[in-house]
Amino acid sequence: MDEVITGLYAVTVHVQDIDRARTFYRDVLGFRELTFSAPASRVTFAFPGTSTILRVHVQGPGEGGREPGTVSGVMFWHADPVAACEEIRRRGGTIANEPRVLELPGVRFVLGVVADPDGNEFIVTNRTD
């Protein structure tokens, strides 16, 4: 069977306040800003180490997709999630779940959860498999 999906172009996150979100993703998480449009309430960031972008914008009336504050399951990678979460907290970010060691059959890794100002949650992990 031929591949149906051949790559990941972007992850979109809806927010309520574009300025607050822009500050969080740029200054707290350290993502490189690619574009910003105040009139459109949209900003895009580069995901480190990939060609994938992060699109953040205020959800328009009648626009589909997840409501602000309901994103979860997106996993960011860092060799030391404890240090990453400590730095995120130092920069003013919220740690929703403190980093902890998880052990599953055949794999051991660290996982923590950070939240943006709207409550969208992102996993920070060093899991590689």
Image (spheres, helix red, strand yellow):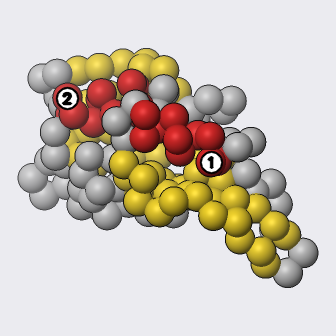
Q: Disc 1 on helix, strand or loop?
A: helix
**Is residue 113 in sight in this rendering?**
yes
**Residue lying at 80% horizontally and 54% vertically, measured from the top left:** 128
Q: Position of residue 2 (x, y in %)?
A: 78, 61
Closest to the observer: 61 or 74? 74
Q: For the residue marked with disc 1, what is the amino acid?
A: Val
**Residue lying at 53% horizontally and 45% vertically, measured from the top left:** 85
**Residue lying at 48% horizontally and 26% vertically, measured from the top left:** 30
**Residue lying at 69% horizontally and 59% vertically, measured from the top left:** 110
Q: Which residue is the site of mark 2?
A: 19
Mark 2 residue crowding within 10 angstroms, few (<14) / some (14–19) / many (20+): some
Q: Position of residue 100 (x, y in %)?
A: 63, 64
Q: Disc 2 on helix, strand or loop?
A: helix
Give the residue furthest to the right: 106
Is the C terminus in the top left, top right, bottom left or bottom right quadrant? bottom right
Q: Is residue 42 left or right of residue 110?
A: left
Per the model, the C-alpha gap separating discs 2 and 1 is 27 Å
Query: Of the numbered discs in the image, which one, if any, rests on residue 82?
Result: 1
Q: Are marks 2 and 1 in contact (CB under 8 Å)?
A: no
Closest to the observer: 8 or 58? 58
Q: Position of residue 57 (x, y in %)?
A: 26, 39
Mark 1 residue crowding within 10 angstroms, few (<14) / some (14–19) / many (20+): many
In the image, is residue 55 above or below residue 128? above
Q: Position of residue 43 (x, y in %)?
A: 32, 28
Q: Is residue 103 left or right of residue 9?
A: right
Picture quarter containing residue 70?
bottom left
Q: Earlier in the sequence, mark 2 or mark 1?
A: 2
Closest to the observer: 77 or 18? 77
Picture quarter containing residue 108?
bottom right
Picture quarter containing residue 75?
bottom right
Count of all numbered marks drawn on residues in the image: 2
